[in-house]
Image (cartoon, rainbow, N blue to C red):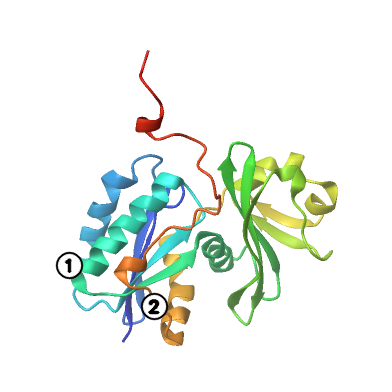
């Protein structure tokens, strides 16, 4: 049987999940800025004997919190190097859609806008459709000012995630299409597993060296300490 560990720390949620022999066990906590304190303990709870019998490690690859994405990628890269395992990256935005599907917020055939608060007045977003129980990407992950958000088509849609905090700043032709909205929804590691299993079966793999977060933004909006000059 396939055995996959999943890790997600891309938002204020810190979570891990283990798929083994058709069963899922998981740990999930809303813990802003505490991911590095909680993650290893969660992993030990799920795998007291270590990564024995694992086939692969899935991770929320982004977009999301810059620090959170690095924490997950570092942990996953270490596990994959140590145990000789491949990695399976899964979009954080797609993960949220699988969470909505599991919770009954979205159903077969729905068009789903998945968002995250990108801060500095922007949001990450991607557009999906649920088809035969799978989450199919229609528009890949982007970052935009809320007022610049443009979506193809005119169908009603389900809207998810923290980027909806900017709903009042979105163009009316976008926000009027929201049939339902779930701004408090956060990704969970257990919802990485459907996409990870699909990738595993398709033969998609990353080596430990290839593990890398997806930041979306091309530029960094802050300077490294060495670039900041002398302190006053």
Q: Secondary structure at mark 1?
A: loop
- Percent across and percent down for residue 196 are 44, 74
In this figure, which residue is indicated by the disc labeled 2? 205
Classify the position of the C terminus by image quarter. top left
Camera-side residue: 217 or 16? 217
What is the crowding at mark 2: few (fewer than 14 residues within 10 Å), some, or many (at least 20)?
Answer: some
- In this rendering, would 22 be left or right of 135? left
In this figure, which residue is indicated by the disc labeled 1? 50
Name the disc covering residue 179, or none. none
Q: Secondary structure at mark 2?
A: loop
Classify the position of the N terminus by image quarter. bottom left
Task: Give the farthest residue toward the left.
Answer: 49
Query: Residue at coordinates 21% horizontally, 79% vertically from top-left?
Result: 53
- Percent across and percent down for residue 176 are 82, 52
- In this rendering, would 25 be left or right of 149? left
Q: CA distance from mark 1 to mark 2?
A: 21 Å
Residue 126, relative to residue 71: is it above or below?
below
Residue 12 visible, this orientation: no
């Amino acid at each position: 049987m396939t055995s996959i560990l999943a890790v997600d720390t891309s938002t204020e949620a810190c979570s891990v999940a283990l798929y083994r022999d058709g069963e899922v066990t998981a740990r999930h906590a809303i813990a802003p800025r505490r991911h590095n304190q909680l993650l290893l303990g969660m992993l030990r709870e799920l795998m007291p004997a270590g990564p024995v019998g694992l086939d692969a490690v899935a991770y929320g690859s982004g977009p999301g919190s810059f620090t959170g994405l690095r924490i997950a990628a570092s942990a996953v890269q270490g596990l994959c190097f140590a145990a000789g395992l491949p990695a399976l990256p899964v979009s954080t935005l797609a993960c949220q859609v699988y969470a909505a599907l599991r919770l009954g917020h979205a159903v077969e055939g729905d068009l789903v806008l998945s968002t995250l608060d990108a801060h500095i007045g922007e949001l990450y977003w991607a557009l999906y459709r649920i088809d035969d129980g799978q989450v199919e990407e229609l528009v890949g992950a982007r970052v935009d000012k809320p007022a610049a958000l443009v979506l193809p088509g005119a169908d009603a849609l389900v809207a998810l995630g923290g980027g909806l905090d900017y709903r009042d700043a979105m163009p009316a032709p976008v926000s009027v299409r929201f049939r339902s909205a779930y701004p408090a929804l956060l990704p969970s590691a257990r919802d990485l597993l459907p996409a990870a299993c699909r990738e595993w079966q398709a033969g998609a793999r990353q080596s430990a060296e290839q593990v890398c977060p997806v930041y979306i933004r091309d530029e960094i909006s802050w300077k490294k300490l060495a670039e900041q000059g002398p302190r006053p």
